Amino acid sequence: MEFVKLNTGVKMPMLGLGVYGIFETEPMHSAFEVGYRSVDTAFGYNNEDVVGRAVKESGLSRADLFITTKLSNDALRNKNVQEEFEKSLSNLQMDYVDLYLMHWPVKECYIDAWLEMEKIYKSGRAKAIGVSNWQDYHIAEAKKVWSVVPAMNQIELHPRLTQKPLLAVCKAEGIVPQAWSPLGGGNAGEFKENLLTNDVLVKIADKYGKSTVQVILRWDIELGIVTIPKSTNPGRLAENIDIFDFALTADEVAAIDALNKDVRVGPDPDTFNF
Ligand code: NDP
């Protein structure tokens, strides 16, 4: 495993398990067995309790784990940030999280919510706080009032959406980027098939004796992007973490960068309405 140091000094694994849509502990146990120590959940995924149970059952030390959860849009709108955070801790059966993210920048609510999250960080019950789905203009607005710089921005990012301008803004602020739907998400549709069978990726994968998925995840790591692929399949969980024994050349990274088409598979932060 490789790690990144967040702006709070906290060390975060570069690869974690995304658990959107996972409601059983088995995939988490399979993940822990092959070395995953970071889990990305959210209040809105309705599975914080499953994560909490899996952690308890695993017998792993809490200090060796990195648990991320997220503040829901409802909590932003209803201005009950503190109450929802307490619920998240209780669902997780934990007295702190390693990273607390704002799930979406709900218009007219996200600045106030950020200031509430700063209080949580200062209380020590979130070792780091960050955001998700923030565009450059959300960062610019919040910067006028923040006293804590977000440690992370979790955004949709894969070879068809490389997000270079936003990555540059994050870098300038010391905000670590994290890729959601790093493999193009859960749709087994044309988009995903085309991505995972893309010639450029296949050629690089063949060179290293790796899969195209492993090449995509390694590309994230080379770019300093924390990545959280989701899988429920023990074989694929093992495959996805087996990316720390090779490195891409600068030319290979650039060739994957060039696959960008600015295509999203998930909601657009400019227009989402949930
Ligand atoms: P991913 O890009 O991680 O893709 C998951 C899909 O890829 C699943 O269908 C999975 O199937 C399949 N898959 C996984 N590994 C492999 C492999 N080695 N080979 C072939 N197929 C594979 O999609 P997600 O949308 O789940 O994104 C990951 C995480 O990001 C989420 O779980 C969540 O934690 C986070 N997220 C955050 C969002 C936000 O707004 N902040 C929005 C969306 C996601 P199988 O399980 O059968 O292996």
Image (cartoon, rainbow, N blue to C red):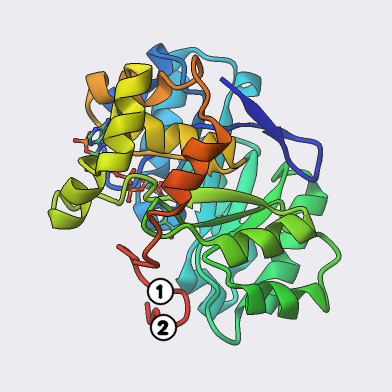
* Relative horizontal placement of residue 165, taking residue 271 as reference (left or right): right
* Location of residue 130 with respect to 116 vertically, above or below: above
Choose between 13 and 160: the one closer to the eye. Answer: 160
Question: Where in the figure is residue 196, as x and y percent of width and height?
Answer: 24, 41
Q: Residue 249 in the image: x percent, y percent? A: 54, 30
Disc 2: which residue? 271
What amino acid type should be assigned to the residue bearing mark 2? Thr
Report the residue at 52% width, 14% height from top: 60
Q: Ligand 1 shows up in which quadrant of the image? A: top left
Spatial separation of the CA atoms under disc 1 and disc 2: 6 Å
Secondary structure under the numbered disc 1 in the rendered image: loop
Report if the CB atoms under discs 1 and 2 are less than 8 Å apart: yes
Badge 2 element: loop
Extreme residue in the front direction: 251
Q: Is residue 23 left or right of residue 15?
A: left
Asked if residue 17 shows in the view, the reply is no
* Spot occupied by residue 68 in the image (x, y as percentages of width and height): 55, 43
Residue 128: give x, y in percent of width and height: 71, 46
Q: Residue at x 77, y 53 (%)?
A: 174
